């Protein structure tokens, strides 16, 4: 899995690419911990490059959500591929998160206009 992080205003945009499964979960978890340790309270996860997500990937997203909630932070998702979207629907997690079409829409949902 590839993980790319960029800061856009006060939002950490974390783009994931590949399979977000149990073998990839520790690397992703570490990347998100770095964000949170930096004091980031707004995270946008771009899943447009994720072809597959397992319970291991979902666990990481839930872990990040809980950590952000303790910091009064917010996590939003964007770019869900059809398979990933179906997993979020089946698990009822689609109701838990604000899901945006793409990074631009996700940033706008945080009140940030991409330059």
Image (cartoon, rainbow, N blue to C red):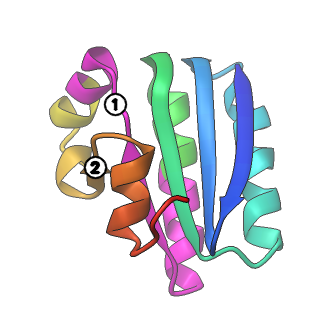
Q: Is residue 52 left or right of residue 21?
A: left
SS assignment at label 2:
strand
Disc 2 marks which residue?
99
Find residue 109 and report its horizontal and vertical position in percent: 33, 66
Disc 1 marks which residue?
80
Q: Disc 1 vs disc 2: Cβ atoms closer than 8 Å?
A: yes
> Which of the labelled discs sits on residue 47, or is there none?
none
Q: Is residue 88 left or right of residue 35?
A: left
Which part of the image, by quadrant, shows the N terminus? top right
Find residue 29 and report its horizontal and vertical position in percent: 71, 45
Which is more toward the observer, 82 or 56? 82
Q: In this view, does 110 lie to the left or right of 65?
A: left
Which is more toward the observer, 22 or 7? 7
Question: Magenta segment range?
Answer: 62-86
Q: Is residue 79 left or right of residue 93?
A: right
> Which of the marked residues, 1 or 2, is nearer the chain's N terminus?
1
Find residue 105 and report its horizontal and vertical position in percent: 33, 52
Image quarter of residue 64: bottom right
Residue positioned 82% across, 59% down in the render: 34
Residue positioned 51% across, 46% down in the render: 45
Say whether residue 78 is magenta: yes
Mark 2: few, some, or many residues within 10 Å (few <14, many ≥20)? many
Which is more toward the observer, 71 or 107? 107
SS assignment at label 1:
loop
Mark 1: few, some, or many residues within 10 Å (few <14, many ≥20)? many
Residue positioned 75% across, 79% down in the render: 39
Distance from the alpha carbon under mark 1 to that under mark 2:
8 Å
Find residue 65 and report its horizontal and vertical position in percent: 49, 63
* Image: 51 above or below 17: above
Say whether residue 44 is magenta: no
């Amino acid at each position: 899995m590839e993980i790319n992080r960029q800061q856009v205003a006060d939002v950490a945009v974390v783009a994931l690419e590949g399979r977000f499964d149990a073998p990839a979960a520790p690397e992703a978890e570490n990347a998100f911990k770095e964000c949170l340790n930096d004091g980031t309270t707004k995270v946008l996860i771009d899943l447009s490059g994720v072809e597959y997500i397992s319970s291991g990937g979902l666990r990481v997203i839930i872990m990040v959500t809980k950590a952000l909630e303790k910091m009064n932070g917010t996590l939003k998702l964007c770019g869900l591929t059809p398979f990933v979207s179906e997993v979020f629907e089946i698990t009822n997690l689609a109701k838990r998160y604000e899901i945006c079409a793409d990074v631009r829409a996700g940033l706008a949902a945080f009140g940030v206009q991409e330059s």
